[in-house]
């Protein structure tokens, strides 16, 4: 069982999903399309519980920091190994994981629309905001505060 210490510091799930939705809507071909496919695969793993983009491992709980580090290391190793056919896909995976983990400020698809405001900002007078005491959302992404 993983502990909170094993949880990576990821962007809010709304940001991950907004970026993922924008990537799914993007229509194009060539190296840019492969970059976006790699980014979408990485974000699908983090936000939707899909298998990891490179190792293919599945999870039953939250993504752990060691799992994210392993995917990043795999991407870096494969990029450095000179896999020209998958290079843009691998760079997309690497960039999305780095963006999700706050290691870069530029998202994979910079012109994606902003995510909606958090539910807690919708609470009005006399309407309590949802309990946000935990750092983990229902799908297992750990959010930064």
Image (spheres, grey):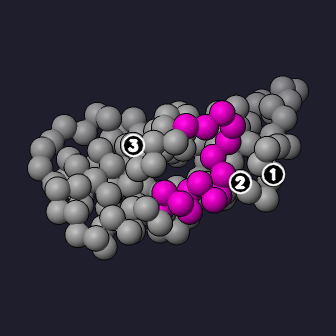
Question: Would you name the residue on which mark 1 appears?
Answer: 3
Crowding near the residue tagged with mark 2, few <14, some 14–19, many ≥20 C-alpha atoms within 10 Å:
many
User: Looking at the image, is 115 positioned above or below residue 75?
Assistant: above
Which image quarter: residue 20? Answer: top left
The location of residue 91, given as percent across then percent down, is 32, 61
Q: Residue furthest bottom?
A: 80
**Which residue is pictured at 17% across the width and 62% down the height?**
84
In the drawing, what numbered circle is on residue 41? 3
**Is the C-beta separation of discs 2 and 1 under 8 Å?**
yes
Give how far apart the Cα atoms at labels 2 and 1 are. Answer: 7 Å
135 lies left or right of 89 = right
Give how far apart the Cα atoms at labels 2 and 3 are. Answer: 20 Å
The location of residue 74, given as percent across then percent down, is 43, 62
Q: Residue furthest top?
A: 127
For marks 3 and 1, the one nearer the N-term is: 1
In the drawing, what numbered circle is on residue 7? 2
């Amino acid at each position: 069982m993983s502990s909170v210490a094993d949880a990576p510091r990821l962007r809010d799930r709304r940001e991950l999903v907004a970026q993922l939705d924008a990537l799914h809507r993007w229509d194009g071909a060539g190296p840019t399309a492969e970059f976006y496919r790699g980014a979408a695969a990485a974000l699908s793993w983090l936000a939707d519980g899909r298998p990891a983009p490179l190792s293919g491992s599945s999870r039953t709980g939250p993504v752990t920091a060691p799992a994210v580090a392993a995917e990043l290391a795999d991407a870096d190793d494969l990029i450095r190994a000179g896999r020209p056919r998958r290079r843009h896909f691998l760079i997309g995976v690497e960039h999305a994981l780095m963006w999700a983990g706050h290691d870069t400020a530029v998202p994979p698809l910079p012109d994606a629309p902003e995510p909606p405001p958090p539910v807690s900002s919708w609470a009005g007078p006399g309407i309590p905001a949802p309990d946000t005491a935990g750092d983990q959302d229902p799908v297992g992404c750990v959010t930064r505060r």
